[in-house]
Amino acid sequence: MLICLCFGSAMTAYISRTPKYEEFIWRKEAHQFLELPFDNNPPPSFNSGWSLCPECKHTLKFYDLIPILSFISTKGRCRYCKKAIPLSYPLTELASLLTCLPLLFISTNWISLLILTCIFSLLICISIIDWKVQWIPDQLNLLLLGFALTFNIVESTISMKDAVLGMMLGYLCIVSIRQLYLIFKDIEAIGLGDAKLLAALGAWQGVESLFYILFYASITGVIYAIFSRKGRYQSLAFGPFLCFSALLNFFITNQY
């Protein structure tokens, strides 16, 4: 439980910092390419140091960073400036705990349990970032791929041949859909981040899982689009649906 909450706490920092920092890098590179001045100060990156309050910039102490409990003890406000803390912080920590908790009843090997906890935490992190900014950091997809392959080496749930084939076909599946839309519709219907994500999911659960993951993701995506009344030309992040479907398929195929 404690590990899950700690991962959730780390995810909140990554989710709040990384999109802003990456956007700063893109803007800086664009200005340099166009030979335009760019004097903006960089926002904090994920590994730039101790956590700060986003409002008053006060350095947070260890007791300000205790997952969920710190939020409750301060009644959802910064201890120093009294500004409201986004509810997404404790909700992300709680989501990490609730999602990973069933692993205690599935995995008996502590190494596999730790790897699966990392995989689940990454899926939550990817889902939230993609939902907010509609792109997936490459480092998250690479980490997910690394943990997926490591899990299959440790647990031998599927063969490495199946894992590698799942990785390759997962990537090619999304890239093919993207290319078809570019040829016939001249639009980018789906991003390469989703292709890398499905490649990692295929490496984790194998070739046969790809059909179910795509099927569940398509169904849930369509249902959401209908109930949220998304317009035909409104963009919709597909990554969260892929992550949810991978988790769903994992629990369906691991009923003990």
Image (tube, helix red, strand yellow):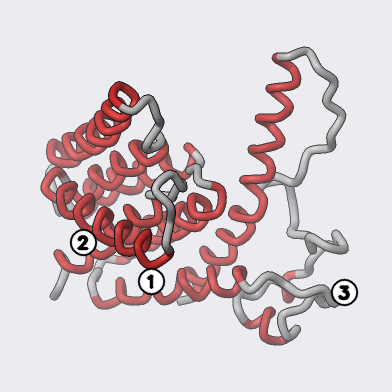
Mark found first going from the N terminus, 2 or 3: 3
Residue type at tag 1: Thr
Q: Quadrant of the N terminus?
A: bottom left
Q: Are marks 1 and 2 in contact (CB under 8 Å)?
A: no
Give the image location of residue 41, x and y in percent.
84, 37
Q: Pointer 2: what residue?
A: 249
Could you say where residue 35 lies in the image, as x and y percent from the top left?
78, 13
Q: Position of residue 142 (x, y in %)?
A: 41, 39
Q: Indicate whether 14 appears above or below 77.
A: above
Judged by depth in the image, the label closer to the viewer, 1 or 2, is: 2
Is label 2 in a helix, a strand or a loop? helix
Label 2 vs label 3, nearer the camera = 2
- Reading the image, the residue beneath label 1 is 99
Q: Which residue is mark 3?
A: 80
Q: Label 1: how many residues lie within 10 Å, few (<14), some (14-19) or many (20+)?
A: some
Find the distance from the CA under tag 1 to the CA under tag 2.
Answer: 14 Å
Give how far apart the Cα atoms at labels 1 and 3 are: 32 Å
Q: Tag 3: Cα neighbours inside 10 Å, few (<14), some, or many (≥20)? A: some
Q: On screen, 88 above or below 32?
A: below
Q: Residue at x 33, y 37 (%)?
A: 195
Label 3 sits on a secondary structure element that is loop
The answer to whether marks 1 and 3 mark residues whose Cβ atoms lie closer than 8 Å is: no
Q: Which mark is residue 179?
A: none
Amino acid type for the residue under numbered disc 3: Tyr
